[in-house]
Image (tube, rainbow, N blue to C red):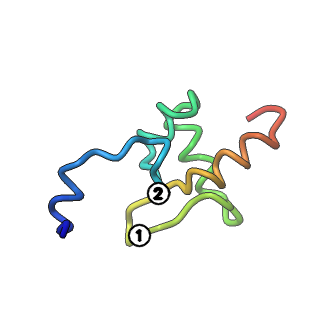
Amino acid sequence: MNTIQDLQRNEIPIKDKYCLTIDEAAVYSGIGQKKIRELSDMDDCPFVIWVGAKRLIKRKKFEDYVDRQFSI
């Protein structure tokens, strides 16, 4: 049986993660960290989730958002 510590030691590929950090989202999308922070500061941002003070990006919703944009 896997413990949480065992799972944390095994790196999950970005493409398989539900949520990404700002750094991971920037690498994944090619969009700068500053721009992702700016977008995720919007009150109605569909792809951000806050865990305390930590900002995480919901990967699939972020992809959907970017797919619908002409420019950012």
Look at the numbered disc 1 and give the secondary structure of its residue: strand
**What residue is shown at x 47% (from left), y 48% (from top)?**
16
Look at the numbered disc 2 and give the secondary structure of its residue: strand
Horizontal side, residue 28 vs residue 44: left or right: left
**What residue is shown at x 46% (from left), y 57% (from top)?**
56
Amino acid tagged 1? Val
| 2 and 1 marks in contact (CB < 8 Å) | yes
Asked if residue 66 is positioned above or below residue 9 in the image, the reply reads above
Amino acid tagged 2? Leu
- Choose the circle earlier in sequence order: 2 or 1: 1
Residue found at the very far top of the displayed protein:
30
In depth, the one of 22 and 41 nearer the eye is 22
In depth, the one of 56 and 43 nearer the eye is 56
Asked if residue 52 is positioned above or below residue 21 in the image, the reply reads below
Q: CA distance from mark 2 to mark 1?
A: 7 Å
Q: Which residue is mark 1?
A: 51
Q: Which residue is mark 2?
A: 56
**What residue is shown at x 38% (from left), y 72% (from top)?**
52
Q: In the image, residue 35 lies at what x, y percent? A: 59, 38
Horizontal side, residue 42 vs residue 23: left or right: right
In depth, the one of 49 and 40 nearer the eye is 49
Task: Give the class, few, some or many, for how many residues have Cα within 10 Å of label 1's Cα (few <14, many ≥20).
Answer: few
Q: In the image, residue 36 lies at what x, y percent? A: 57, 43
Quadrant (top left/top right/bottom left/bottom right) for the C terminus:
top right
Residue 3 is marked as none
